[in-house]
Image: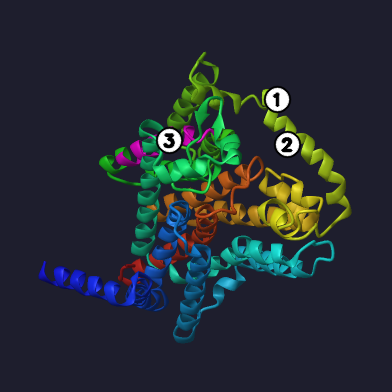
């Protein structure tokens, strides 16, 4: 207590002498330097810090913090890359570059960087701002696949993932039943935000994320992570906790009002049932199918449930029909521009740096449509190949893995990639934090789980253990 009181007194004196800004800078140095050292020297800490920061980034920004937090994320990624190369100097291992997923990711990243020279692009600044979340984040795949070397660390990653998702779900539950904080209300006073978030007399919930879509997709993949972990050999009480978590995630997902997310769960459950066909999974799938069927057809006056039901009747959805019309209008442009109109040509960065261009005013409303417009049909082919190779590798590795725990992990990340692949059509699923980081992490874990299983098998033969 005396130490804390002394620290408080020193900080108070510094504020009086130097001013608040100077003291903040001093505190940043005191906290920042140890953090930088830890991220570079201890990659496990760096990976966890990245995961936590990716979850909390938009929440802190929404609070009105006047600091370039996006640049802070870039710096964190650079530190992870620095730690990666330092580790490679002492423990060189580039074998992962031979993996099919690694090869297609390299091709995808190179193609995105080549787009800076796209003659059809209206602004190089649009490319500069977009490359950070589209291609640079993909480089983290190599950090994950190299630095995640133990089963114990993998368990920690998944626990942190579920804890952060549980916090996000609880936060959305608070928004739904107890209202928004004042800093959230001030942002929602914007007419544009009202048009996006206030639908059918109900406010869509976004939790700690950038928007309801990002929130809902996070709840979906986190619930699927729980469901897949249940298929492993866990104690009954752990399975009950995971089941309750999955239900809590899905209930809060409904508060987002995101139709595109509603159809992902039944699609993923079918995929799980096909991959992991056994009596337990079959019973779970049939039960879930019956419950979802009842929810779809039951008469209701509840706006949240009604919006859920409308997701399974797209022909009656006006917004869906508008998107189809927009896609028809842009199709000739896509066919005549094989490398697209330039990375970042649509959306926020297109409107900011090339407001008069045709693509700046085009609403892609789909991750795949955005890729087709900005990167052309060549880029669309590459991202489809990326998804295909990850899923193919995940399915193959799932059947190769012997350890039940690692098998359930491989199933989980493969299902998550499958789900985000489907979700990337009605919405932009893999461009916002933390979903983009989780997608890359899942792609890396497809390979990591098999590698750990092979190491575990070899260690058992040698009479040692895998930590």
The earlier-in-sequence mark between 3 and 2 is: 3
Q: Which residue is mark 1?
A: 315
The residue lying at 80 percent from left, 61 percent from top is 122
Taking the view exactly as shown, the residue that stands out farthest to the top is 299
The picture places residue 179, in percent across and down from the top left corner, at 39, 35
Which residue is nearer to you in this view: 99 or 433?
433
- Tell me if 215 is positioned left or right of 157 in this view: right
Q: Secondary structure at mark 1?
A: helix
Q: Relative to 70, say whether 180 is above or below.
A: above
Q: Which residue is mark 3?
A: 252
The earlier-in-sequence mark between 1 and 3 is: 3
The picture places residue 51, in percent across and down from the top left corner, at 43, 60
Q: For the C terminus, which image quadrant?
A: bottom left
Neighbour class for label 1 at 10 Å: few (<14), some, many (≥20)? few
Callout 3–callout 2 Cβ contact below 8 Å: no
The earlier-in-sequence mark between 1 and 2 is: 1
Q: Secondary structure at mark 3?
A: helix
- Residue 278 placement: quadrant: top left
Q: Compute the Cα span from label 3 to label 2.
A: 26 Å
Tell me if residue 429 can be seen.
yes
Asked if the stretch drawn in magenta spans residue 29, the answer is no
Which segment did they paint magenta? 241-257
């Amino acid at each position: 207590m005396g130490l804390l009181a002394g620290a408080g007194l020193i900080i108070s004196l510094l504020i009086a002498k130097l001013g608040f800004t100077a003291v903040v800078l001093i505190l940043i140095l005191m906290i920042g330097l140890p953090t930088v050292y830890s991220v570079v020297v201890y990659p496990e800490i760096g990976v966890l810090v990245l995961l936590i920061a990716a979850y909390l980034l938009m929440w802190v920004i929404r609070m009105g913090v006047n600091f370039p937090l996006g640049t802070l994320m870039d710096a964190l990624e650079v530190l992870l890359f620095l730690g990666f190369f330092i580790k490679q100097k002492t423990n060189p291992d580039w074998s992962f570059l031979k993996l099919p997923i690694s090869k297609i990711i390299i091709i995808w990243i190179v193609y995105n960087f080549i787009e800076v020279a796209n003659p059809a692009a209206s602004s190089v600044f649009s490319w500069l701002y977009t490359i950070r979340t589209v291609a640079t984040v993909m480089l983290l795949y190599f950090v994950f696949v190299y630095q995640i070397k133990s089963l114990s660390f993998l368990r920690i990653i998944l626990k942190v993932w579920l804890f952060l998702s549980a916090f996000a779900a609880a936060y959305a539950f608070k928004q739904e039943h107890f209202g928004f904080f004042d800093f959230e209300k001030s942002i929602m006073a914007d007419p544009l935000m009202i048009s996006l978030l206030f639908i059918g007399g109900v406010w869509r919930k976004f939790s700690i994320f950038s928007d309801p879509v990002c929130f809902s997709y996070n709840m979906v993949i986190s619930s699927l992570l729980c469901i897949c972990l249940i298929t492993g050999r866990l104690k009954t009480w752990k399975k009950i906790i995971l089941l309750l978590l999955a239900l809590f995630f899905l209930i809060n997902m409904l508060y987002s009002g995101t139709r595109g997310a509603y159809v992902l769960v039944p699609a993923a459950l079918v995929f799980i049932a096909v991959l992991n066909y056994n009596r337990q999974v079959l019973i779970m799938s049939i039960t879930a199918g019956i419950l979802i069927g009842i929810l779809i057809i039951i008469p209701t006056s509840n706006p949240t449930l009604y919006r859920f039901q409308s997701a399974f009747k797209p022909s009656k959805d006006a917004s869906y029909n508008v998107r189809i019309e927009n896609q028809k209008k842009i199709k000739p442009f896509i066919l005549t521009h094989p490398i697209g109109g330039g990375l970042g040509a649509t959306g926020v960065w297109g409107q900011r740096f090339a407001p008069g261009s045709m693509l700046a005013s085009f609403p892609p409303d789909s991750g795949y449509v955005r890729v087709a417009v900005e990167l052309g049909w060549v880029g669309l082919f590459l991202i489809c190949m990326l998804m295909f190779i990850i899923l193919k590798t995940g399915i193959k590795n799932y059947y190769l893995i012997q350890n039940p725990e690692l098998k359930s992990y491989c199933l989980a990340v493969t299902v998550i990639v499958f789900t985000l692949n489907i979700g990337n059509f009605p919405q932009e699923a893999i461009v916002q934090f933390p979903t983009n980081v989780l997608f890359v992490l899942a792609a890396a874990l497809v390979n990591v789980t098999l590698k750990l299983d092979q190491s575990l098998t070899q260690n058992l033969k040698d009479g040692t253990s895998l930590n």
